[in-house]
Image (cartoon, rainbow, N blue to C red):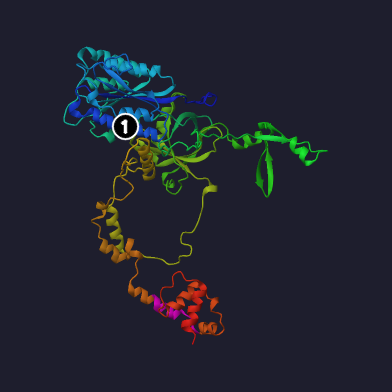
Amino acid sequence: MDSDEEFENPPVWKGVPGTIILINIFKTAEFNTFTLGHEATCRLLKQYMRSASNQNIAVCVFGIEESNASLLDCKSITEIIPLAPPSLEDYKKFRDTEISSFKEAKQLIFSEVLRQCSKMFTNCKRQLSYKCIHLLTPLHVPPAETDKRLTITQVEDLVDSNIEIRLINVSPENYSPDPFFDKFYAKANKGLILDLPKPIANARDIEKIMFFESHRNLALAKLNFAIGSDVQISVALYKLIKSGQTYQKKSYLHSETNEMLTSSIKTTKVNINAENMDLDEAESEQNAVPLLKSELLYYVEYGGEKIEFTQAEKKSMDNPFGPPGLKLLGFKPKMIVCKEKWFTKPGYFLFPNENDIEGSTVAFKAMHKACAEMGVVAVCVLCPRVNAKPIHVALSPCTKPLNLDVEIGFYVIVIPFVESVRDFDVNEGNDDCFNVENKNKELMKEIITKTQFDYRADMFENPKLQSEYRAVEAKALNEDEVEPFVDTTKPIISNFKDLRVDLFEELFGPFGALSVKRSAAASCDDAKRSKIEIDQELLTNRINFNTVKEYTVAELKKILKSKDIKDLTGLRKNELVDLVYKFFKT
């Protein structure tokens, strides 16, 4: 199970993903297919413009009569947005498109529509690494009888060309799909017999499906997994969580010409022949010459001195661990792994790669089954790419991570090295031992039980990003008002209405806004304590010897409050000293 070519020819991903969205309007008026598809696609285009994505998106409408607006040589389909990265102009054009501008066809010709999609991918000038067609249609109306066989043939040709077809069932639930789509869906999934997609009648759900399925399912790295000295299998490393969406880097524009300003950094050296020259002549003889990389030196400060390294020495220091790979160190009980305690960076997902080393899947499944049955995790050293520092990881067996349709795999949990572990005493300076009474435990259990909910990864949106997106879009689209959004990070008040707040306050005291308020009785107690804590003998001596200024501001205020003197806020120390002499000097 060894392959010497794994590190000689590492995988290189070239190109950008391409997606075509097809919206069917043939006999779909009762289901509002175009309205739902239009809203979902507008939201999807916004998502890609927000993240400055280079994904190619095309939007077409089919099931229509011949249209002069179409740039395609097909009667039943029109192209609204060409296959290119989404732009603001394309978005406005599609946003203003209405269904009334199209005339419904007399019959549905599916094969012509799919053939045009193949041509669009072929004619795209950019290299595409991933090709996908999102077909938004209800499943109750099949193509014309004479077109069914041609449609199935066209689906097979698209799948053989590595073009994925995603069927999105835009319709209510109270109807039965046509049997034609069972065969259509099976051919689109390479012969697998799967249940047809469930009906969807919500634009947000349609947008989430298209946005989720348009991601490239590419591995971050394809590695050799060394299990012992002579056994290796091939695995692929995936990232389950993508980085938060942000706008592209902000640029500066010229205030007069509005041109984008750029900057460049050049490393040069200046040769000065200062012998037998005065200062003015030396400055005039300065010549800036480009500095070669071989002439550069690097240094690290150690003990107050600069330790110098050449470029070759620095390169050997950066990668002394060899080529990328995954090496097994041993197995430990899974109870030692604590994501919350040892969280140093987001984890990964590990899956077998049968393409590079034959038999990797069998060995991978055997290891997954053994770890799951024995309740252990595999502790490994991972180096995901060239020049990357090795990280310490634990492989935890899992099934269907984040509800993905993946049978088996390993969570790759990053665990710290000894240099990253910090020990500290959480009870330092707190010698009191607090005993929790049973009634307090029962109350907190009740609160936890009533406020539990089912967590999903797509439940919460970043409110800062969402507000920024909408502010920019309102200005870009010349909208009078900023589009509102629901802050999903705020607690739902209705979930807390049945909690026994009175009992909580009785056991633990006031909380929330009430906790900052102080009662009159407490103020009186503080005043009494202040009077008791004042050293009268010391105060008398300092007044007699005119040394009251030796008190601090806080002590002066305490002394004055013992005489019920108020409105001391904002007074300077000299003013407080004068008040002490005024009210305490006899």
Q: Is residue 498 left or right of residue 242?
A: left
Q: Residue 25: where, in percent of width, then height?
A: 23, 23
Say whether residue 531 is magenta: yes
**Which is the main secondary structure of the residues drawn in magenta?**
helix
- Residue at image point 32% right, 46% down: 488
Residue 563 falls in which quadrant of the image? bottom left
- Residue 197: say if magenta: no
Q: Is residue 84 among what the camera can see?
A: yes
- In the image, residue 241 sits, relative to residue 14, either above or below, namely below
Q: Residue furthest bottom?
A: 586
Farthest-out residue, front: 256
Instruction: Pinpoint residue 266: horizontal percent, then vertical percent.
Output: 62, 34
Q: Residues within 10 Å of mark 1 (few under 14, many from 20)?
A: some
Q: What percent of the width, then of the height, locates residue 138?
A: 22, 26
Q: Which residue is mark 1?
A: 42
Q: Quadrant of residue 521?
A: bottom left
Residue closest to the far top: 146
Which of the pair 29/3 is nearer the observer? 29
Residue 160 is at least partly visible in this image:
no
Q: Hey, which quadrant is residue 369 in on the image?
A: top left
- Magenta stretch: give its range: 526-536
Q: Position of residue 208 (x, y in %)?
A: 31, 34
> Which one is nearer the viewer's eye here, 114 or 520?
520
Q: Tell me how many marks there are.
A: 1
Considering the numbered disc 1 on the image, is that residue within a helix, a strand or a loop? helix
* Residue occupying the far right of the picture: 276
Q: Is residue 329 left or right of residue 19?
A: right
Residue at (51%, 52%) from the top-left corner? 422
Q: Residue at x 45, y 76 (%)?
A: 558
Vertical relation: 334 (above or below) 62: below
321 with respect to 331 (left or right) = right
Identity, as a three-letter code, of the amino acid under mark 1: Cys
